[in-house]
């Protein structure tokens, strides 16, 4: 690549990211009874034994949201907490959180969404992944590190120490 902007590619990328955001809006409009209480227990991957997986489009949307709040790096946390949490333990990008964070395993919010009720949305995210040259969904910490690197950030050891 010659380093110059490619307007057609940029337009396709913008349309793909718009589709990811539309998937999030469509999910929110579904009559599936959930009530996130912002407890962040589901954000403790070692505690739950479960980690959300992100497609490339979701990771890019999350990376853009992180950059919008002033973060230029993201790193896996040794204590198993989600790298999207701030120092107070709250999601730095809650409104742009990935699909898996919106639908997966949080018992306090109502448990996982039945896959059959969101399969069409998953397929749309997979289509965006292909459009962006992704290889399929990846574990959140890995997907975010890659997306931030592509966005110009680099890994940092922000979460090296476990918090009591």
Image (cartoon, helix red, strand yellow):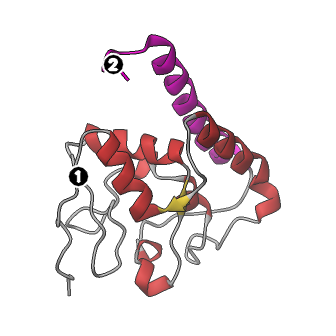
Q: Give the residue number, with chain letter if any, for mark 1.
A: 73
Question: What residue do we see at 55% from left, 22% from top?
Answer: 12
Distance (Cα) linking label 1 and label 2: 26 Å
Which residue is nearer to you in this view: 11 or 83? Answer: 11
Q: Tell me if mark 1 has few (under 14), some (14-19) or many (20+) residues whose alpha carbon lies within 10 angstroms of its own.
A: many
8 up-or-down from 90: above or below: above
Q: Disc count in the image?
A: 2
**For residue 156, what is the image quadrant?**
bottom left
Q: Does the magenta stretch include residue 134?
A: no
- 64 relative to 124 in the view: left or right: left
Q: Is residue 6 magenta?
A: yes
Image coordinates for residue 142, horizontal then vertical, percent:
41, 62
Image coordinates for residue 108, horizontal then vertical, percent:
55, 76
Whether residue 36 is visible:
yes
**Dots 1, 2 in contact, CB < 8 A:** no
Question: What residue do we see at 39% from left, 64% from top?
Answer: 141
Give the residues in magenta: 1-30
Which residue is nearer to you in this view: 70 or 78? Answer: 78
Which of the image's four quarters has the C terminus?
A: bottom left
Q: What element carries label 2?
A: loop
Question: What residue do we see at 46% from left, 52% from top?
Answer: 97
Is the stretch drawn in magenta largely helix, strand or loop? helix
Image coordinates for residue 117, horizontal then vertical, percent:
80, 56
- 113 relative to 4 in the view: left or right: right
Please tell me whether mark 1 or mark 2 is closer to you in this view: 2
Q: Residue 2 carries which label?
A: 2
Q: Which mark is residue 15?
A: none
């Amino acid at each position: 690549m010659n380093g110059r902007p490619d307007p057609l590619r940029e337009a396709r990328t913008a349309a793909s990211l718009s589709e990811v955001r539309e998937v999030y809006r469509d999910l929110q409009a579904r009559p599936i009874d959930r009530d996130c209480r912002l407890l962040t227990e589901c954000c403790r991957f070692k505690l739950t034994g479960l980690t959300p997986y992100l497609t490339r489009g979701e990771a890019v949307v999350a990376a853009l949201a992180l950059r919008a709040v002033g973060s230029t790096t993201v790193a896996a946390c040794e204590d198993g907490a989600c790298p999207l949490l701030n120092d107070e333990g709250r999601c730095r990008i809650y409104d742009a959180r990935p699909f898996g964070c919106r639908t997966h395993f949080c018992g306090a919010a109502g448990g996982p969404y039945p896959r059959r009720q969101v399969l069409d949305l998953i397929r749309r995210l997979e289509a965006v992944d292909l459009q962006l040259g992704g290889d399929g969904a990846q574990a959140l910490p890995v997907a975010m590190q890659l997306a931030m690197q592509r966005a110009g950030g680099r890994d940092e050891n922000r979460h090296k120490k476990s918090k009591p």
